[in-house]
Image (cartoon, coloured by chain):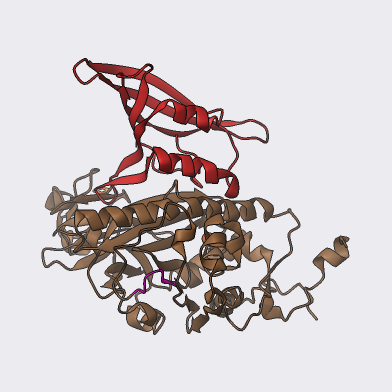
């Protein structure tokens, strides 16, 4: 994703892939889903990117896998990782912390290669400046 | 032809109502005056009643005039607003943005207050104050508040202001039916942008920037009738833009529109801008509410709320959430573009950047790409400030 190889990213996803960015919003004491897509929806989102006006500052997603929980029977693994997203400005290259959170992944292990089945980006950060068009 | 310095600063070839001097967006003194003459006089949305559903629920609010406030629902279920400051040594009373408390107790020396703003306890009062001072001298500063027009909690820090109804006038008439059922805030987020609050409100007052949004270029703008939508100005600087049908299915991924909104035609869109920085934006199945809270001439917090009906089923709510966030969430398609726009204006218009004019010159019979919405706003702004927006310091030597 950092290198914007979206086709490459989707190749690593199962056909039943689901993606969501969620957060708890304490001000209104509610759960929120900020982005929710299936594989088709993600592809559309990526395909439409060049048609939108967007912040072009590149992101670096730093992911540390903390817990891997393998379910032999289901042939799946669930992982929990911590996420830090940094944004680097094109003019001058200053880097700022953009968002922190956790990633909850479910990986299908029943095929030739592991495929991402479900990804929930669970954000702690809710103040995201002007926002961003590319998911984390 | 490009222009030299003299030509760049020359008065635009419009009547003076059709351009503004960019110093209104950058000048510190003007901003201080706006806090005093505009924000401290106008009714401002502090939160929504659904954020305080139970007795003793509270919600804090940074008022754009500068005061820190909190709104709290009393035992009598009435919402009241107070300064979030302890009368003793000026401490913040409520630190969390939201909560529930029967007593507001200051963490410093434990003075405590009820939800009516009465001081109900001063520890060791008699020992320290004898008969010179007591809890009845220590009530909180209450601020006028009213709940209305869709269940929003409005505040006015001016004790001598008129009523909320007088302030709004007929401006929300077009949405009367749309706001007739109890609403609920389902999403809330803030953005800080280094720009002037009026530039955000301007963006919400002009649709000519459809060109910035891929989504709008292929939905609304392509449709017959789009260019017939009309602006209507109301006294007090408020304005509305009427409904239309939007061809959502032109944007892949947003075809099915089932939930809708009471009183809104399928594919309709109603937008109402309230002076000085609040926008009701009703589209698809969602009411979006923006509140612009300036922190300085070039720093702005925008509060974004998405609302549905209190009576929503989980399925209906999920659809509203999707409709809202696809376009207007932090990862939405349009909000990012709108925020990039005002961010760019904030970069370009700075003191010493030699910006000079901003043009509001489009006239198209008050239809959608006419810039009459902004002109209407600045007429009210000039009146309240006692300064014309086209010549705020009286030194432009206009012809
Ligand atoms: S400052 Fe609040 S009790 Fe002293
Ligand atoms: Fe916009």
Q: Is residue A127 above or below residue A96?
A: below
Taking depth in this image into account, of B163 and B160 the one nearest to the observer is B163
A81 falls in the magenta region: no
- Tell me what residue is drawn at x 23 percent, y 61 percent: B50
Q: Position of residue A86 (x, y in %)?
A: 50, 30
User: Is B60 on the left-hand or right-hand side of B103?
Assistant: right
Q: Residue B397, image x and y in percent? A: 79, 76
Q: Quadrant of the C terminus of chain B?
A: bottom right
Q: Nearer the viewer, residue B297 or B334?
A: B334
- Residue drawn at 49 percent across, 51 percent down: B333
User: How far across and how far down the image is residue B6, in percent?
Assistant: 87, 65
Vertically, is B347 above or below B264? Answer: above
Give A130 or A114, whichever is nearer the viewer: A114
Viewer can see residue A67:
yes
Q: Position of residue B164 (x, y in %)?
A: 34, 78
Q: Which chain is brown?
A: B
B91 on left or right of B29: left
Q: Is residue B29 visible?
A: no
Identified at 61% across, 74% down, the residue is: B371
Q: Quadrant of residue B260?
A: bottom left
Q: Nearer the viewer, residue B238 or B73?
A: B238
The mark total stands at: 0
Q: Quadrant of the N terminus of chain B?
A: bottom right
Q: Main secondary structure of the magenta part?
A: loop
Q: Which residues are magenta?
A: B264-271
Is residue B267 in the magenta section? yes
Q: Is residue B269 left or right of residue B108?
A: right
Colour of the chain lettered A = red
Instruction: Describe residue B318's horizontal placement relative to residue B77 as left or right.
Output: right
């Amino acid at each position: 994703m950092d290198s914007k190889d979206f086709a490459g990213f989707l190749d690593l996803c199962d056909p039943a892939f689901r993606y969501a960015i969620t957060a708890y919003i304490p001000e209104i004491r509610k759960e929120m889903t900020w982005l929710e897509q299936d594989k088709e929806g993600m592809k559309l989102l990526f395909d439409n990117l060049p048609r939108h006006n967007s912040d072009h500052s590149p992101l670096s997603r730093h992911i540390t896998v903390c817990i891997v929980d393998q379910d032999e029977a289901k042939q799946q693994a669930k992982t929990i990782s911590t996420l830090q997203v940094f944004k680097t400005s094109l003019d001058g290259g200053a880097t700022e912390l953009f968002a922190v959170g956790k990633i909850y992944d479910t990986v299908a292990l029943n095929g030739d290669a592991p495929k991402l089945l479900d990804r929930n980006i669970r954000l702690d950060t809710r103040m995201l400046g002007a926002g961003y068009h590319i998911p984390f | 032809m490009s222009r030299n310095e003299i030509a760049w600063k020359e008065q635009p070839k419009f009547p003076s109502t059709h351009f503004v001097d960019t110093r209104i967006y950058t000048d510190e003194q003007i901003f201080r005056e706006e806090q005093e003459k505009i924000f401290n006089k106008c009714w401002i949305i502090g939160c929504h009643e659904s954020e305080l559903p139970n007795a003793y629920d509270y919600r804090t609010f940074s008022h754009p005039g500068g005061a820190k406030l909190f709104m709290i629902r009393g035992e009598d279920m009435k919402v009241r607003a107070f300064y979030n400051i302890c009368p003793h040594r000026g401490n913040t009373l409520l630190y969390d943005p939201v909560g529930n408390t029967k007593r507001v107790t200051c963490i410093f020396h434990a003075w405590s207050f009820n939800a009516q703003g009465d001081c109900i306890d001063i520890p060791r009062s008699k020992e320290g104050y004898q008969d010179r001072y007591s809890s009845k001298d220590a009530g909180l500063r209450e601020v006028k508040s009213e709940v209305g027009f869709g269940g929003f909690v409005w505040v006015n820090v001016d004790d001598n202001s008129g009523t909320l109804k007088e302030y709004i006038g007929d401006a929300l008439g077009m949405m009367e039916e749309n706001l007739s059922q109890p609403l609920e805030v389902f999403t809330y987020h803030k953005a800080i942008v280094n720009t002037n609050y009026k530039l955000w409100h301007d963006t919400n007052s002009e649709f000519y920037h459809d060109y910035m949004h891929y989504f709008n270029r292929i939905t609304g703008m392509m449709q017959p009738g789009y260019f017939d939508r009309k602006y209507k100005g109301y006294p007090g600087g408020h304005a509305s833009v009427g409904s239309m049908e939007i061809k959502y299915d032109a944007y892949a991924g947003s075809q099915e529109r089932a939930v809708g909104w009471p009183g809104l035609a399928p594919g309709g869109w109603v937008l109402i801008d309230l002076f000085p920085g609040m926008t009701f934006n009703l589209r698809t199945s969602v009411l979006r509410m923006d509140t612009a809270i300036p922190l300085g001439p070039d720093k702005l917090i925008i509060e974004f709320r998405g609302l549905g009906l209190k009576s929503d089923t989980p399925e209906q709510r999920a659809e509203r959430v999707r409709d809202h966030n696809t376009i207007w969430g932090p990862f939405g398609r349009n909000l990012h573009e709108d925020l990039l726009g005002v961010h760019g204006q904030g970069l370009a218009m700075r003191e010493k950047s030699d910006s000079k004019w901003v043009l509001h010159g489009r006239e198209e019979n008050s239809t959608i790409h006419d810039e009459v919405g902004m002109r209407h706003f600045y007429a009210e702004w000039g009146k309240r400030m006692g300064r014309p927006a086209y010549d705020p310091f009286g030194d432009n030597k206009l012809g």
